[in-house]
Each structure stands twice: as C-alpha cells, then as structure tokens.
Amino acid sequence: MARLSEDQIERYSRHILLPEVGGGGQKRLLESSALCIGAGGLGSPVILYLAAAGVGRIGVIDGDVVDVTNLQRQIAHATADLGRPKVLSAKETAEAINPDVRVETYHERLTKDNAADLIARYDAVIDGSDNFPCRFLVNDACFFARKPLISGAVLRFEGQVSTFLSGPEAPCYRCLFSEPPPPGLVPSCQEAGILGAIVGTIGTIQATEFLKLVLGVGRLLTGRLVIYNALTLEFREIKLRKDPKCPLCGAHPTVTELLEYDETCGAPAPS
C-alpha cells in the first residue's frame, strides 16, 4: 500500500500516536478485511467502529430489513431506514463515517451453500447473528477455512464474547457447545427482551478483538469466554479448553462438512 496521505494521517492521528499502532499498524488496518455476520444489534457497533478505525474492506451479510423494534439498539439504522435492507443502511452509515472504507453488502441469509465462499474472501469473521444454528454454521465454516472467528451473543441483561483461532490446541465453538439446543429451548431477544446498550458493550469488544488481531497486539480472547452482566456491571471469565471429543475439531470428528439446521440464519427462533 502507498504511504498514508496527509488526510489519513490527520484522520487516524490518535491511532498513530499509539506506539503499538503507529503508521505501519494503521496501514495494516487499511489493508485488512472483515466479514460481519448480521447488521443488527451486535453488527451495528462492530461495523461502525471498524469503519471509524479504517478497516479497508468490511463485508456485511444480513437478509433482514429495518423494523421499528430494531431502533432501540441497532445504531447503524435510523427511522428513515424503516423497511430498507439492513445491509444498505449499515453501508451508508459506515461510509458516511469514513470514505476510506469499502462496505460490501450481501442481502441474503448465510447458508451452507454460500458460507464457505463468503468467508474465504475475508481475513476474519465477526459473528453477530441472533440464533444458534447460524453460530454453528459460522463456526464450522471458519474452522474449515482456517479463519479467525470473533463470536458474540446477547440476551436480556447479559452478553458473552470469545475469539476462536485455528490451531492444534485451540478450542472451537463446538468445544463449548457441541450441538445447537432444541428449537424453542433458548428464547430469542424477540421473546425475552434485551437491554439496548448491552449490544454496544459486546459489539465494541468484538471490534476491539479484530483490531488487536490485525495489529498483533495484546492478548486475544482465545481460550477464554467473557460473560458480562449489566445489572451488576461484572465481567466473568471462563477458561475454554479444546475438547478431545469435539465433533468438529476433536480426535475423531463426526462433523466433516457444513451442516444446516432447521432454523435458517438470521431468522427468529420459533416460539
């Protein structure tokens, strides 16, 4: 990449002042790419903070349109966007923040037919999906593609986040949950509710993990699951270990290709 322009040096000056980032780190961010699964509650802060940070190429896949109930927490969208595809609204908001950034949109569901091809185009995946079948599909696709996965989830007053990397000793999402729960067992935000600002906390952590990954600084949430309780303002950390019996990354895997469960990615959980 060419040297940073004067405008870029000014825009990213607070990054460049950090010895851990500097001009070289900012150039790496501008050359990096991330695929964001979902442009909703978690996807909104992820997309906006990556754009502001100068991540050069951001892919966004989401098949939904903006609904009035989204506006309580999904800050990439405005009232004027009601009825529009979320990917278009998020693209316009992100590119208005930073014209250096290119946002690539996919107004569709993530499926086993398109997941591998999409994920292969990006450096890492940030999962902001709202259901278990999609999380398992994303995890499996990232494992097969050997792509880093930054996974987040929220419900009511709590959120959780972890980073999964490929490697012989690294756990995957299935080491934490081997299979999706039965449909309807775990309520969705649509059924149980969500305190709007929580998605900002978890989404911002996800964005931070991606920036650290690209810059090669700090300690990633690999092998660790952070659980956030907004009511007590406490963060709890659980150590994750590779499960030798994991159906995906264990010694004798039974998941050897992408699977698609009954519930499609991005669809609300059944009542």
Image (spheres, rainbow, N blue to C red):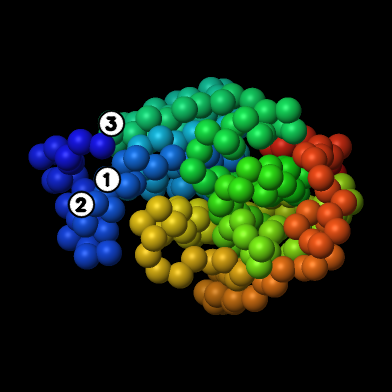
Seen in the picture, residue 49 relative to 76 is either above or below; the reply is below
Q: Can residue 199 be seen in this view?
A: no
User: Tag 3's secondary structure?
Assistant: loop
Residue found at x 73% / y 28%: 113
Q: In which quarter of the image is the N terminus?
A: top left
Q: Is residue 14 left or right of residue 220?
A: left
Quadrant housing residue 115:
top right
Circles 3 and 2: CB distance less than 8 Å?
Answer: no
- Tag shown at residue 19: none
User: Tag 2's secondary structure?
Assistant: helix
- Tag shown at residue 23: 2
Q: Answer with mark 1 or mark 3, whichever residue precedes in sequence.
A: 1
User: How many numbered marks appear?
Assistant: 3
To which residue does mark 3 refer? 99
Circles 1 and 3: CB distance less than 8 Å?
Answer: no
Q: Can residue 102 be seen in this view?
A: yes
Quadrant housing residue 94:
top left
